[in-house]
């Protein structure tokens, strides 16, 4: 059967009204968790200021999750990102505060330093053949020690105003407020940004659906597609309205949205992104097909170092100082976000948006349990249970798919 015949057969085949739990389960779980904590907190979870706090307080972990998902897709792991956040934040503090360098120059130097750290680790992993677990475990210790050395075991601050604005600031109301009835007023510019984001999301998803259908792959029915897009659009617009009611969009959310968009396009629509999936899916087949595996692995660790440096500057800017304990356990949160968001333990599976969703699930659990006064040990218990459940679900769906064949 030719490709044209396959496409015709697929086009004429009736689509079924069903939901793929493997791809959609994480979003359903996220919605249920939000509803649960909204009820438990009497609506406090979804108040404008609290939503803004959730985004700002967890932005650096979400940035790390973007780089971590690519590494996990390729079949590796990075345990050093928390220490890299600390050392790059301390470097930025020394450059901006102690040496008085202009903040744009200091920011560029810090990001380059993060890339060099990633290149250092990527060389040992990709070209020397040491497992990523060992290399990054060593890096976790090395860069934490370097942080203590640079800071002299004390904090350095305060940071320049532009850096603090990036970490804690909000966009201005450019077009004025508009009335929204019982919701109150909201910035028109922020609302327009939300509408543009929804339109772009729907167009991209429809294009992806059409492409998959054209190649004979199974797709959701139109009804399921419409329900998914309506739910996603309602969520985006609700968040935008709530944020606009508080202090408009946090600048760090603008940065995060740009990173999610850029990395999603890279992962799904570029040769480099497809090769990352190929390496994690079947390393031997990737080598035989001519993919330069070592180069790809090297560059994803360079990318992780760059994103860790960005997260380091944002975290230090939010606290207004670089401290020796910065970044503690960030690697665990980033890894958990990737796996909760749908990454496969064996590699080859995962999405940037899924990792962000996984990170938001962890953030909502942290925030919601804090609002209801749960002790820290109970929060850790719930987060550990959620992570285990996510990985167990991944293993179960794979076994079920294997049995179906």
Image: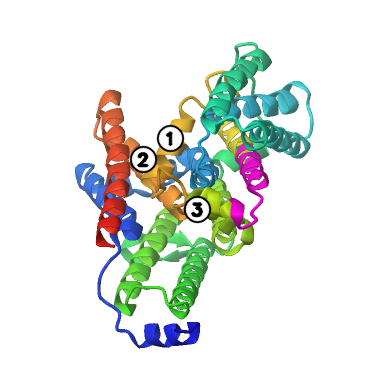
Q: Residue 290 colored magenta? A: yes
> Are circles 2 and 3 on residues that touch, CB within 8 Å?
no
- For disc 2, the marked residue is 362
Residue 202, quarter of the rendered image: bottom left
Residue 283 point in image, percent of width and height:
53, 48
For image coordinates 53% across by 64% down, the residue present is 193
Residue beneath the point at 30% across and 77% down: 223
Of the pair 77 and 306, the residue shown nearer to us: 77
Residue 374 shown left or right of residue 213 in the figure: left
The label shown at residue 261 is none
Q: Main secondary structure of the magenta part?
A: helix
Q: Is residue 312 above or below residue 156?
A: below
Check disc 2 and report its element: helix, strand or loop. Answer: helix
Query: Dot 1 lies on which element?
Result: helix
Residue 380: give x, y in percent of width and height: 31, 29
* Quadrant assignment, res 153: top right
Q: Position of residue 354 (x, y in %)?
A: 42, 52
Spot the residue most to the top.
152
Q: CA distance from mark 1 to mark 3?
A: 27 Å
Q: Which quarter shows the C terminus?
A: bottom left
- Can residue 373 be seen here? The reply is yes
Q: Which residue is mark 3?
A: 248
Label placed on residue 333: 1
Considering depth in this image, is 238 or 106 the residue closer to the camera?
A: 106
Local crowd size for mark 3, using a 10 Å CA cut-off: few (<14), some (14–19), many (≥20): many
Q: Are marks 1 and 2 in contact (CB under 8 Å)?
A: yes
Q: Where does the magenta region start and end?
A: 287-306
Give whichever of discs 1 and 2 has the lower sequence position. Answer: 1
Comparing labels 1 and 3, the label whose residue is closer to the camera: 1
Structural distance between the alpha carbons of marks 1 and 2: 8 Å
């Amino acid at each position: 059967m030719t490709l044209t015949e396959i496409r015709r057969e697929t086009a004429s085949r009736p689509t079924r009204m069903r939901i793929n739990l493997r791809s959609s389960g994480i979003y359903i779980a996220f919605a249920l968790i939000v509803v649960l904590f909204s009820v438990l907190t009497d609506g406090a979870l979804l108040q404008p200021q609290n939503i803004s706090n959730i985004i700002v307080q967890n932005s650096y972990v979400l940035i790390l999750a973007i780089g971590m998902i690519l590494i996990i897709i390729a079949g590796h792991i990075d345990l050093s990102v928390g220490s890299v956040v600390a050392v790059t934040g301390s470097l930025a503090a020394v450059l901006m505060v102690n040496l008085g360098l202009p903040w744009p120059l200091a920011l560029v130097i810090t990001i380059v330093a993060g890339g060099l750290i990633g290149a250092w680790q990527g060389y040992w992993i990709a070209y020397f053949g040491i497992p990523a677990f060992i290399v990054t475990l060593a890096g976790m210790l090395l860069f934490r020690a370097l942080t203590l050395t640079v800071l002299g075991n004390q904090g350095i601050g305060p940071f320049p105003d532009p850096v603090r604005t990036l970490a804690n600031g909000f966009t201005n109301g450019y077009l004025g407020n508009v009335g929204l009835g019982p919701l109150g007023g909201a910035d028109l510019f922020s609302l327009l940004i939300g509408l543009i984001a929804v339109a772009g999301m729907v167009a991209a998803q429809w294009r992806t659906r059409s492409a998959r259908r054209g190649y004979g792959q199974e797709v959701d029915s139109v009804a399921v597609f419409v329900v998914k897009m309506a739910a996603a659009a309602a969520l985006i617009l609700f968040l935008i309205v709530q944020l606009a009611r508080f202090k408009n969009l946090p600048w760090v959310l603008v940065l995060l949205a740009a990173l999610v968009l850029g990395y999603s396009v890279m992962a799904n629509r570029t040769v480099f992104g497809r090769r990352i999936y190929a390496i994690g899916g079947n390393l031997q087949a990737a080598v035989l097909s001519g993919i330069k595996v070592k180069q790809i692995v090297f560059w994803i660790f360079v990318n992780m170092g760059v994103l860790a440096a960005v997260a380091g500057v944002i975290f230090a800017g939010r606290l207004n100082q670089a401290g020796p304990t910065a970044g503690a356990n960030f690697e665990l949160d980033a890894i958990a976000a990737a796996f909760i968001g749908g990454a496969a333990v064996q590699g080859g599976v995962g999405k940037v948006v899924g990792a962000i969703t996984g990170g938001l699930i962890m953030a909502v659990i942290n925030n919601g349990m804090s609002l209801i006064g749960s002790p820290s040990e109970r929060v850790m218990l719930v987060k550990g249970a959620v992570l285990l459940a996510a990985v167990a679900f991944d293993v179960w769906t794979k076994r079920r798919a294997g049995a179906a064949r």
